[in-house]
Amino acid sequence: MTLSVDRLTDPAVRAFVGALNSGDRDSFRAALTPGATMSDDGTDRDLGEWTEREIFSSGGHMEIESQSADGLALVARYRNDTWGEMRTAWKFVVEDGKVGRFETGQA
């Protein structure tokens, strides 16, 4: 069973996932704080380069399996044209209603 994006409880996470799934670069950037950071499998990455490669130019998409009680952690089936589909964990730090950091990796 998957959760629809509109059932995600944290508004910043909901905006992030909605923009990611629709491939909307402008809305995605708007969901992030200035200077937002991220890591992939425990290694900090350049957010702009990573999101372009892993999300926007490769058709990235999340199917949400579950969310934590506070809505700041997700388990999702993530797929893109480069890597196919994998089960991933996502953790978010929200600052002033926007995502200031996200961490992702295989679940």
Image: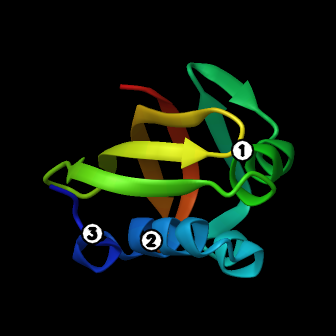
How packed mark 2 is, by other alpha carbons closer than 10 Å (few <14, some 14-19, many 20 or more), is: many
Please say whether residue 96 is visible from this viewpoint: no
Which of the marked residues, 3 or 1, is nearer the chain's N terminus? 3
Residue beneath disc 1: 54
Q: Residue at x 37, y 56 (%)?
A: 63
Disc number placed over residue 12 in the picture, else none: 2
Say what amino acid the circle numbered 2 marks.
Ala
Q: Quadrant of the N terminus?
A: bottom left
x and y percentages locating residue 26 in the rendered image: 76, 79
Looking at the rendering, in which quadrant would you find the C terminus?
top left
Q: Give the color scheme: rainbow, by chain, secondary structure or one colour.
A: rainbow
- Closest to the observer, 8 or 58: 58
Residue lying farthest to the right in this orientation: 49
- Which numbered disc flags the more N-terminal residue, 1 or 2? 2
Kindly report the distance in space between the C-alpha atoms of the residues bearing marks 2 and 3. 9 Å
List x then y, in percent, for residue 94: 46, 59
With 1 as the anchor, is 58 left or right in this view?
Answer: right
